[in-house]
Amino acid sequence: MLSAISLSIYEYRKYLVLSLVISLIAIPLADILVIQRDRNRNEMYGEAFWIFGFDIYQMNDTYLVERITEIHPEWNFDDGEHTLPDYLTNVNYEYPIFGLFFFAIATWIFPGAGGLQQLWLNFILVLVFNLNLVLLAILLRDKIKTEFWARMFFGGYFIYGIIMSAGGGKLEPLVDCLLLMSFVLWREKQHGKAMFALGLGVQTKIYPVVAFPVFFLGNPVSAIWFILSLGVTVIPTFFGASFDSLFSHIFNTSEYSSYIVNPLYPGLAIGTPEFVTDPVTFHTWFPALIPLVIYVFFMLYTIRAYLPAKSDFEGKSIRLKLLELKPFYLYLLPGVLFVFRWVMPWYLYWLGIVVVLFDKDKHAIGYMKQITVVGLLYAFGILCNWPYFIAYPLPDFLEHFPLQWWITLIGLFLIGFLTAVAYKIWKWEFERSEKRSAINREAEARGELLI
C-alpha cells in the first residue's frame, strides 16, 4: 500500500499541489465565515483529555467548560462556540475513542487553545483529505480518465472533502482515510490489515461498519483482526470511559435529541415535534411520507439490476452465494438514511464511498444515480416539512454563520475568486514547465548540450 501511495502521489503531484493551495485559501476564510462547532468542541475535549483522562466521557459540555475554565481561563472555552446547542447540552461526550485520540494528539503537538490551534486542526485534516484523494486514485485507477461516473464521484468527493476539512474541521476525512486504506489493503489481499484498519475507522465514526459484511464474507477468518482492533475502545472502559451517549447518538434516540433534523425520516408523519409546549408534544404531518414513497417506487424500478440470476447460485457454498448478493446489499445501503432521526446532508458521502466496492461499472453508475436521487429527496423533504424545519432546525443551522448574510456571500465569492486565480497561476506555471521540458527533450534528441 505504501508503494502504491508513493507512486500515486508522484503521478498526481501537480493536482495535489493545486488541492493544497485551494485548501490553504479556504482554511482562514472559512474560519471567519463559519462557527466550526464540531472542530471547536473536539479541540476542547482533546485538551481536556490531558487533564481529566477518560473521565471526560462522564462529562457534558457545560460541566466540562466550567471545570476547564477554572484551570485555564485564558483558553476561552466558555465563549459559546465550543459547546453543543442548548437542546444538546446534557449530552456527554459521545465520539468513539480513536477520534478522541486524534484530536488529543493534535492538540498535544500544538498546545494552547486559540485561533492558531484551530487553524492547525483544519490543516491536519486537509492533509488527511489529500491523502484520501490519493487513495481514491489508487482504487479508481484509469476509471478517473475513462469513466464519467468516476470523474463525477471524484469531483464530488473533492468538494465534500474541502468542506469537511478546510471548512468544517470535522472527523470525516480521518474516518474516510481509514476506510479507504482498508479498501486498498483488501484489494492487495492483505485481509487482516484491511479488517484492522476498518475496525479503527468504526472506532472513529461508526459508518465504516457497512463494509464489514463484505469483508467478512470475503474472508471470515480476517474478522479476528477487526475484533482485536476493538481493544482500542474496550481498554479505556477500565479507566472510567463510558459510551452511553455514543450508543444514544448511533441509534439517534430521543434521549440524545428531541429534535428531528432528517427530512427523510418517515416518523415525522406521525411525530413532528412541537417545542412551543412543555413537555414537547407531537402532531401528524402526512406530507412527510412523500420522500419515502418516491424512494420506494424508485427502488422497485431499479433494484432488479442488482439481483443475481438463479444460475449464479448453482453449485456454490452458502458463503459464495451470499457474496453474489454483494451488489444488492450495497445498493440497499442509502435506504438506511430514512431510518434515523439525525441525518445531515453530508452523510450522503458517508455511503457514497462504497461505490468503489462494485465490480461492474453499470452497478456503480446506478448507485451514483441513487445517491443523487436521495440527495434530491433530502432537499425535497425539507420543502415537504417546511413548517417544522423553518421553525426549528434551519434557524439552528444558520446560527453557524455568525456574520450578516451579505458578508457571508462576499466571503464565499472571495474563496471562489481566489480559487480561480490559484488555478490560473497553477495552470500557467505547469504548462510553462511542461513546455520547457519538451524543448529540452527535443534538444537532447538532436544531440545538443544543455547547460
Image (cartoon, grey):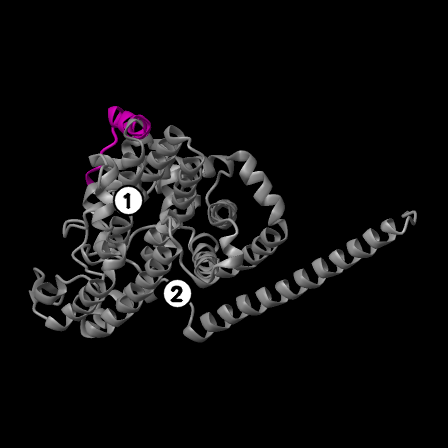
Q: Nearer the viewer, mark 1 or mark 2?
A: 1
* Circle number at residue 210: 1
Q: Residues within 10 Å of mark 1 (few under 14, many from 20)?
A: some
Task: Name the secondary structure under disc 2.
Answer: loop
Q: Nearer the viewer, residue 386 or 109?
A: 386
Name the one closer to the observer, 45 or 397. Answer: 397
Residue at position x 37%, y 28% in the image = 192
Q: Is residue 405 left or right of residue 397?
A: right
**Residue sitting at x 22%, y 54%:** 336
Image coords of residue 333 (percent x, y): 26, 52
- In the picture provided, is 276 more to the left or to the right than 165? left
Residue 401 image label: 2
Image location (x, y in percent) of residue 294: 20, 69
Q: Please state if 106 lies on the left or on the right of 441 as rendered.
A: left
In the image, residue 15 above or below residue 322:
below
Residue at x-position 40% and y-position 44%? 43
From the viewer's side, name the closer residue of 5 and 57.
5
- Give the amino acid type for the residue marked by disc 2 in the picture: Phe
Residue 229 part of the magenta-drawn span: yes
Element under disc 1: helix
* Inter-mark Cα distance, 1 to 2: 33 Å
- The disc at residue 311 is none
Using the rendered image of the protein, determine whether residue 135 is visible from the camera's viewpoint.
Answer: yes
Q: Given the image, on which type of amino acid does mark 1 rest?
A: Val
Most prominent secondary structure in the magenta stretch? helix
Choose the circle earlier in sequence order: 1 or 2: 1
Check whether the beta carbons of the residues at disc 1 and disc 2 lie within 8 A of each other: no
What's drawn in magenta, residue-wise? 222-244
Query: Looking at the image, is 200 positioned above or below residue 349?
Result: above
Q: Is residue 78 left or right of residue 416?
A: left
